[in-house]
Image: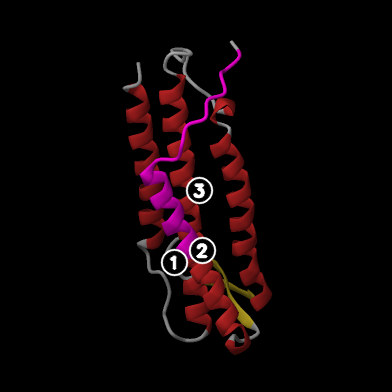
Amino acid sequence: MKRPIIDIPKTGSEWLWDVVGCLFFVGSLLFLVFVWNQLPDEVPAHYNALGEVDRWGSKWELLLLPGIGVFIIFLMQVLEKHPELHNYPARFTESNADQFYLHSRKIVNQIKNSCLLIFSVILLESVSIALGWGGGFGKWFLPITIIGMIVLLVIGIVKQKKIQ
């Protein structure tokens, strides 16, 4: 079955997620620009599962997360714009396509913006540690991040199961 192409306007929640994700991402980039000349030559480049720095690297490595973030923004924007490309269960029909498309697009939107939030927090924390302002994430950052993403996906799956 060729999937229909349906133009569904963005919802308020999608706009809210986009604004929050974008504000955090752009804010972290602006923060990096303002403190760039104050950064030492070596900054935290990797963290272990307990949130402790286990590798130091050049301050230029801090540009990796924003670079990946920009890639994620473009890739996920394409996926949000074309929900007909997503994978759907066998009960997908033309009559429920708009529900599946909207729901799937919302999940992609939430994951995109969650990634931007996570990358922003990691960038801010790395800069803070490099400048001696903070001591690290602590052991709760990774579990909270993983649980948060799993919760988003589980809620999405439960909501999708309700689509008839």
- The residue carrying mark 1 is 51
- Dot 3 alpha-carbon crowd within 10 angstroms: few under 14, some 14 to 19, many 20 or more: many
Question: Which amino acid type is shown beneath numbered disc 1?
Answer: Gly
- The residue carrying mark 3 is 112
Q: Position of residue 130 (x, y in %)?
A: 53, 82
Region in magenta: 2-24
The stretch drawn in magenta includes residue 3: yes
- The residue carrying mark 2 is 25
Q: Secondary structure at mark 3?
A: helix
Question: Which amino acid type is shown beneath numbered disc 2?
Answer: Phe
Q: Secondary structure at mark 1?
A: loop
Residue placed most toward the observer, 17 or 58: 17
Residue placed most toward the observer, 36 or 9: 9
Depicted 123 relative to depicted 158: above or below? below
Q: How many marks?
A: 3
Precedes in sequence: disc 1 or disc 2: 2
Horizontal side of 68 relative to 54 (left or right) equals right
Residue shown at 47% from the left, 32% from the top? 8
Looking at the figure, which quarter contains the N terminus?
Answer: top right
Depicted 146 relative to depicted 108: above or below? below
Question: Which amino acid type is shown beneath numbered disc 3?
Answer: Lys
Residue 135 figure quarter = bottom left
Looking at the figure, which quarter contains the C terminus?
Answer: top left
Precedes in sequence: disc 2 or disc 3: 2
Residue 48 can be seen in this image: no
Q: Position of residue 115 (x, y in %)?
A: 49, 53
Q: CA distance from mark 2 to mark 3?
A: 11 Å
Q: Position of residue 51 (x, y in %)?
A: 44, 66
Q: CA distance from mark 1 to mark 2?
A: 21 Å
